[in-house]
Image (tube, coloured by chain):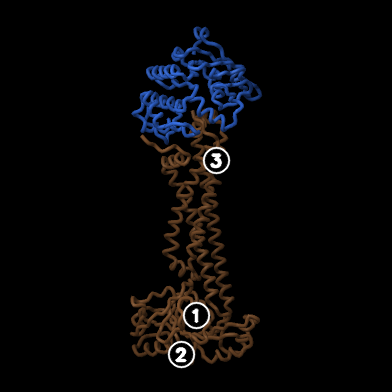
Amino acid sequence: MVLTIKNLTKEYMRGNTAFYAVDNVNLSIDRSEFVSIIGRSGSGKSTLLNMIAGLIKPTSGSISVDGQDILALNDKCISLYRNSKIGYVPQGNTALGDLTVLDNVRLPFYLHKHMGDPTSKALSLLEQLGISHLAKMFPKHLSGGELRRVFIARALINDPVMLIADEPTSDLDAETTIEIMELFSQIAKKGTSILLVTHELDTIKYGDSVYVMEKGKLTRGDSVLLTSDF
Amino acid sequence: MILKPLTTFRLSMNNLRQKPFRTACLFAVVAILTSVFFGGSILTASLENGLYSLQSRLGADIMVVPEGNDTNVEDILIKAEPSNFYFSANIADEIKKIEGVDKVTAQFFMTPLSSACCSIVIPIIAFDPETDFLIQPWITKVYNDPIKDGEMITGSSVLPLEDNTLMFFNKSYPIIANLKRTGTGLDGSVYVTKDTMKQLIIDAKEVGADISTDENVEESVSAIFIKIDPAYDSRLIAREIKQKVPNVDTIVSQHIVSNISNSLKVLESYIHLITAVVWILGALVILIVFSVTLNERKKEFAIFRILGATRKKLVAIVLTESFLVSIVGEIIGIILASLVVFPFSDLISSKLQLPYLQPQNSSILAIIALSLILSILVGILASIYGALKISKAETYLTMREGE
């Protein structure tokens, strides 16, 4: 298994009342598997994703990625994990405006020690994603769809075992959404596991399996989807 | 395609380059801080150096001048102003008899009053090489033979003609030595023997040139300089001279030095105060600019964290930026201050009316190094808080704030 989550819980306090953003979640993702999690805003899916990315500490439970318990890692190790084991495509525009497209993609390579030629690899990724002609441009000159491709390339630069994406198509038009989702499918077919959270029903058909997140609880979603309105 | 690695240094450089206005403002603040510190330090070092030079150059413990001219002595020593006070040369013999007086030598001052007659209008000081203990020690540092009649020795700021002579009253005088700079009025004087002075006065009369004296060099002197036995107190001997020799004023060298030293202390305290105020304000400006800037860059640092940057890496990026700002600002500041303190040192000296002697290159380099250390320290201290704050920020929450 690439990802194994057991009894994961995140509890927050709202005033004096405790509420569970993530409530006793269990999830496993295999190599090359493409998993979609769908849910309304505030259902806890982004919290779950951020816990998997090591950005939020859970209240209880365990997360194991590629056999490694990520909750036991210190800052240096969790940073290395985020840099090498996973590729994270966060919500919204997360480009570094001072760097060119090519440097945005190359950047994760230089944050820790890696072997190889990051420039060739970044150019190759940009080529595969159909935006190599934008390599020398700055992010402000790119459209939403082009930027999303840049973030995917950036997430793949260190050959992660799993790509996690938070609402990757939320601000894209229908045509670009299809292009991006097909890209994710291709990436999964090449061996990288994909975990994607979304609130758009149109996108879930690209995944191998679908889960629904509601009030912090994660359930297998194939049947629920038929009756839910997202 | 070969591209440079995205090292911490390059990322910091890139950030500075991409925000030219903010970077220029930071450079300007550090440059102002450094130029004030460097300029102020060079100024105070030059004044202290000048005072030390004057102290060691004075050589005499007591100076005796005609009554009412004690204040003029400081003008001669510091500003090289023309003087025309004289008294009988026999006074030197009377002073020699006083107990505790070790050495006595006299000098005769004369200044041409018109530039038409001479290549330069500066005070000419006649001394007696046989009794002199003031100028001779400085001459031996640059010239081994004794000065002869018809020869001249110049202070450091006196510029000779091309053939290394000076023209006075249609006669040319060879310059045998140029004394080391002292930062005092002594730099702007010419030194000759009594016989040369006699000849100069005769020549001046022959050509009808105005000079500051019509006294006889053999019978009159302008000032008598006394070296006392170390076992005696110079102030007590000065008092005894005043009692025993009529119509004279005595000046104790220590008194001149302490007077100048007092003026210097006041000036230095102002310089230190201004420097301290500018540095505190500058440090606050840098602190505010860095804090505001880092606050604006919270999302940028959150992205770095998402991509796998450690907290140390974020701190390193911020501190490298601050370091680069400090270095560049420091260089600009030193260049700006140097453009003022070095080319205009003579003007500063004349405006301050205090002995002013630029420190040696090694001291200047030490001041540059100290300015650099201080500017880097201020830059780092001003940015470290923001850097640590940004590194400890919760990435997830920061990203949400940015949405």
Say which chain tag 1 marks: B
Q: Amino acid at mark 1?
A: Ile
Pick whichever of labels 2 and 3 is earlier in the sequence. Answer: 2
Label 2 and label 3: CA atoms lie apart by 75 Å
Residue B85 seen in the figure: no
Name above or below for residue A107 compared with residue B377: above
Secondary structure of the residue carrying tag 1 is loop
Quarter of the view holding residue B116: bottom left
Tell me what residue is drawn at x 45 percent, y 21 percent.
A168
Residue B265 image point, x, y percent: 57, 66
Residue B184 seen in the figure: yes
Q: Which residue is mark 1?
A: B135
Q: Amino acid at mark 3?
A: Gly
Q: Which chain is brown?
A: B
Say which chain tag 2 marks: B
Residue A82 image point, x, y percent: 52, 28
Crowding near the residue tagged with mark 3, few <14, some 14–19, many ≥20 C-alpha atoms within 10 Å: many
**Cβ atoms at labels 1 and 2 below 8 Å apart:** no
Q: Is residue A219 left or right of residue A186?
A: right
Residue B302 image point, x, y percent: 51, 32
Tell me what residue is drawn at x 50 percent, y 29 percent.
A83
Residues at discs 2 and 3 both on one chain: yes
Q: Which residue is mark 3?
A: B386
Label 1 and label 3: CA atoms lie apart by 61 Å
Say which chain tag 3 marks: B
Q: Which residue is mark 2?
A: B217
